[in-house]
Image: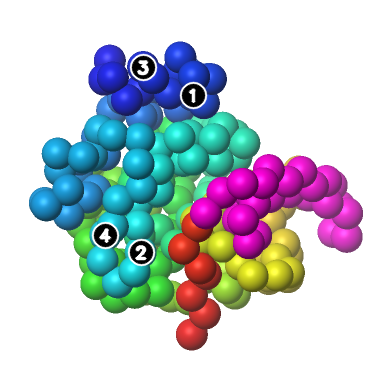
């Protein structure tokens, strides 16, 4: 087991077996630019170009534990960047699940798609990548069991994302400097928890 994964477990950020296995199997070094490969196993955010980052492993572990992905889930991954979260989720959901990854920056869309396919996730149809602004979600394949957003909205959570979540589904989305957990109880009712003290790149809307 890598030191990074071991530290995340020891410090209480990685808890579930499926996530631990995904973090161990999906090597972060495959999702960073070449010049940052030596830092890939450090618990820090790293630049991936265009003012974007691959998030700190501690933060990704926390967000994915809250998201609670399971085999066969259909998941919308917004702001997929270098493809790391998409690949982690694909590793968990397996061949009968699906991850729809949205990335608005064309070069990062290609970078992330190529990185995820190092594990054959695109070729095997477990992941689909789209070069799109994620603020309207991806209604073509809604509803989703889970929605993960990896960039911060500045105010209200987009209604389109709430609408595309299944009843009983869960969404993790940064709002300003907080990570927000939403669980959809009914078409109009959501359970909400907020975890403050984080920094994310801003949500890009075209």
Q: Is residue 66 visible?
A: yes
What SS does tag 3 mark?
A: helix
Could you tell me which residue is drawn at 39 percent across and 19 percent down? 7
Dot 1 alpha-carbon crowd within 10 angstroms: few under 14, some 14 to 19, many 20 or more: many
Direction left: furthest residue: 34
Task: From the top left corner, tell me how far across and down residue 190 is, in percent.
Answer: 83, 51
Distance from label 2 to label 1 (Cα)? 24 Å
The tag earlier along the polypeptide, 4 or 1, is 1
Contact between marks 4 and 2 (CB within 8 A): the answer is yes
Could you tell me which residue is drawn at 83 percent across and 46 percent down? 191
The magenta span reads 172-199
Direction front: furthest residue: 197
Q: Is residue 198 left or right of residue 9?
A: right
What SS does tag 1 mark?
A: loop
Distance from label 2 to label 3 (Cα)? 27 Å
Question: Please, is residue 91 above or below residue 166 in the view?
Answer: above
Task: From the top left corner, tell me how far across and down residue 114 is, in percent.
Answer: 20, 57
Residue 143 is labelled as none
Distance from label 4 to label 2 (Cα)? 6 Å
Dot 4 alpha-carbon crowd within 10 angstroms: few under 14, some 14 to 19, many 20 or more: many
Placement of the N terminus among the 4 image quadrants: top left
Task: State yes or no: residue 190 in magenta.
Answer: yes
Q: Is residue 33 left or right of residue 57?
A: left
Q: On the image, numbered disc 3 is attached to which residue?
A: 6
Dot 3 alpha-carbon crowd within 10 angstroms: few under 14, some 14 to 19, many 20 or more: some
Distance from label 4 to label 3 (Cα)? 25 Å
Q: On the image, numbered disc 4 is attached to which residue?
A: 48
Residue 52 is labelled as 2
């Amino acid at each position: 087991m890598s030191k990074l994964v071991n530290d995340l477990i020891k410090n209480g950020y990685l808890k579930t077996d499926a996530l631990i296995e995904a973090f161990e199997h999906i090597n972060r070094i495959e999702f960073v630019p070449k010049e940052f490969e030596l830092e890939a196993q450090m618990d820090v955010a790293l630049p991936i170009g265009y003012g974007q980052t691959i998030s700190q492993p501690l933060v990704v572990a926390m967000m994915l534990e809250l998201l609670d992905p399971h085999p066969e889930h259909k998941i919308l991954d917004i702001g997929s960047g270098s493809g790391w979260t998409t690949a982690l989720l694909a590793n968990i959901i397996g061949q009968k699940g699906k991850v729809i990854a949205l990335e608005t920056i064309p070069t990062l869309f290609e970078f992330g798609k190529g990185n995820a396919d190092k594990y054959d996730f695109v070729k095997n149809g477990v992941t689909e990548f789209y070069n799109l602004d994620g603020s309207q979600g991806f209604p073509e394949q809604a509803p989703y069991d889970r929605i993960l957003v990896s960039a911060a909205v500045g105010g209200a959570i987009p209604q389109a994302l709430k609408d595309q979540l299944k009843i009983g589904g869960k969404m993790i989305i940064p709002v300003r400097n907080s990570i927000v957990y939403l669980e959809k109880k009914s078409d109009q009712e959501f359970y909400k928890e907020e975890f403050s003290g984080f920094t994310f790149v801003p949500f890009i809307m075209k």
